[in-house]
């Protein structure tokens, strides 16, 4: 006799306590840039977008990347800010809606670093900031960060975290993945500094640790801090920040000591081994190495692996729903992850989590291009 999909999915819908916060189930909405906040202000449509996913059964929502108040933090049009009266008022509405629907929510705090170029809002004269200078056509488009710049960025992250707590968020996530600023310091290829912020693992960690420490001091001991990291980068799918599990532990354990509560291990395919010679995923290794809870993410729920072309429209993003609840439940029971993040599947189907919980897999909506243009469905 076959076990029902509803029974198999049950382990995914157990609560998880993290300090004073209880997440109602193990389903997370992954952060996804939507470019739907003109002037950096999330409007009522953004509030409705997130609320609908909480109503659909998502336990924890991680917002799209939202940029801190450092002048060089933003790199894209119409993405939300996390500073200023209007933007924070918009985010407060988002929080209230998600909480009213029974969900938990954290903002992903973001600095794009060297991905920024002059000509980008809000101040088009400001260059990018990164570990190293970048010159294009004789013009410095990315400034090598000074000690003062580094301290300023850490203080900016701390202010954002303090504001997140003040307006009712349930924690924060630091975006340390995918080739953005924090990750640029971790990745040897983008960080070839010769001072105390470059070179050795200890030095490359100095800036990320400074941020975690500043945030922890700003929010106190019990406010959850999530740290998202990745091996792959938007510009290089094969890039790695750690060649072995031991090297990964050297990167992550100091961050845990400084105050990170949960690691968000971003991969393009959640089921693939994290390192050659081992069947364990990156999330599994992270959990074992740090002893911290882990969010696993990477093409869950769909039949096509994530590619940045899905969002830039350089390839057909359409894909069919593919949910193997038996496999997910086995990974969860085995301790491969504590929470599982769903991305594109939730763009097309706000009720994805509830349908999986109830065993209604045949009712899941497939992902298509239209989901990239609409917030509310």
Image (cartoon, grey):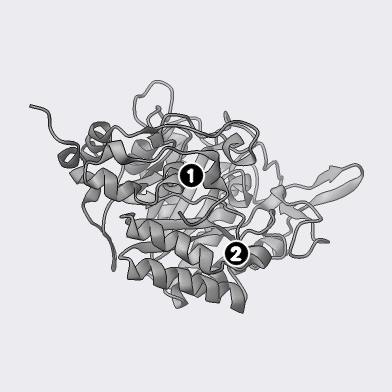
- Residue 29 is left or right of residue 318, and the answer is left
Which residue shows up at 29% across the image and 36% down it? 362
Q: Give above or below for 220 relative to 62.
A: below
Q: Which residue is mark 1?
A: 251
Q: Nearer the viewer, residue 236 or 36?
A: 36
- Residue 163 is left or right of residue 125, and the answer is left
In the rendered view of the protein, which quadrant contains the N terminus?
top left
List x then y, in percent, for residue 166.
46, 77
Q: Nearer the viewer, residue 189 or 234?
A: 234
Q: Label 1's element?
A: helix
- Residue 236 is left or right of residue 248, and the answer is right
Res. 344 visible in picture: yes
Of badges 1 and 2, the one in the foreground is 2
Asked which quadrant contains residue 246, the reply is top left
Q: Tag 2: Cα neighbours inside 10 Å, few (<14), some, or many (≥20)?
A: many
List x then y, in percent, for residue 79.
62, 58
In the rendered view of the protein, which quadrant contains the C terminus?
bottom left
Q: Tag 1: Cα neighbours inside 10 Å, few (<14), some, or many (≥20)?
A: many
Which residue shows up at 57% across the image and 37% down it? 310
Res. 172 visible in picture: no
Q: Which disc number belongs to residue 154?
A: 2
Q: Label 2's element?
A: helix
Q: Which disc number belongs to residue 229?
A: none
- Tell me the distance, in whole angstroms, between the alpha carbons under discs 1 and 2: 18 Å
Q: Nearer the viewer, residue 375 or 149?
A: 375
Name the residue furthest right: 138
List x then y, in percent, for residue 10.
18, 45
């Amino acid at each position: 006799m076959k076990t029902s999909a509803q029974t198999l999915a049950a382990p995914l819908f157990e609560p998880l306590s993290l300090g004073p916060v209880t997440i109602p189930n193990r389903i997370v909405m992954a952060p996804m840039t939507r470019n739907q906040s003109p002037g950096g202000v999330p409007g009522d449509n953004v509030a409705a977008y997130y609320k609908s996913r909480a109503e659909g059964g998502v336990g924890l929502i991680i917002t799209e990347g939202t940029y801190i108040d450092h002048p060089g933090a933003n790199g894209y049009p119409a993405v939300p800010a996390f500073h200023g009266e209007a933007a924070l008022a918009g985010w407060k509405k988002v929080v209230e809606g998600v909480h009213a629907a029974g969900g938990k929510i954290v903002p992903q705090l973001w600095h794009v670093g060297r991905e920024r170029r002059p000509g980008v809002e809000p101040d088009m004269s400001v260059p990018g900031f990164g570990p190293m200078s970048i010159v294009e056509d004789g013009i410095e488009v990315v400034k090598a960060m000074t000690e003062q710049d580094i301290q300023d960025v850490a203080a900016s992250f701390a202010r954002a975290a303090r504001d997140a707590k003040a307006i009712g968020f349930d924690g924060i996530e630091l975006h340390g993945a995918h080739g953005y600023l924090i990750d640029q310091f971790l990745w040897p290829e983008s960080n070839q500094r010769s001072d105390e912020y470059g070179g050795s693992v200890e030095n490359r960690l100095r800036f990320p640790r400074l941020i975690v420490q500043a945030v922890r001091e700003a929010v106190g001991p019990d406010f959850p801090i999530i740290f998202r990291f990745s091996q792959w980068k938007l510009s290089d799918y094969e890039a790695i920040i750690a060649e072995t599990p031991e090297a990964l532990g050297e990167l992550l354990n100091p961050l845990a000591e400084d105050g990170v509560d949960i690691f968000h291990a971003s991969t393009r395919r959640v089921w693939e081994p994290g390192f050659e010679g081992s069947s364990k995923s990156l999330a599994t290794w992270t959990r074992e190495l740090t002893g911290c809870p882990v969010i696993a993410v990477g093409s869950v729920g769909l039949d096509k692996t994530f590619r940045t072309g899905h969002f830039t429209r350089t390839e057909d993003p359409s894909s069919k729903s593919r949910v193997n609840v038996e496999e997910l439940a086995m990974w969860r029971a085995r301790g491969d992850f504590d929470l599982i993040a769903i991305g594109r599947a939730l763009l097309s189907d706000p009720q994805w989590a509830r349908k999986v919980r109830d065993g209604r897999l045949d009712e899941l909506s497939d992902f298509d291009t239209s989901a990239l243009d609409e917030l509310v469905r």
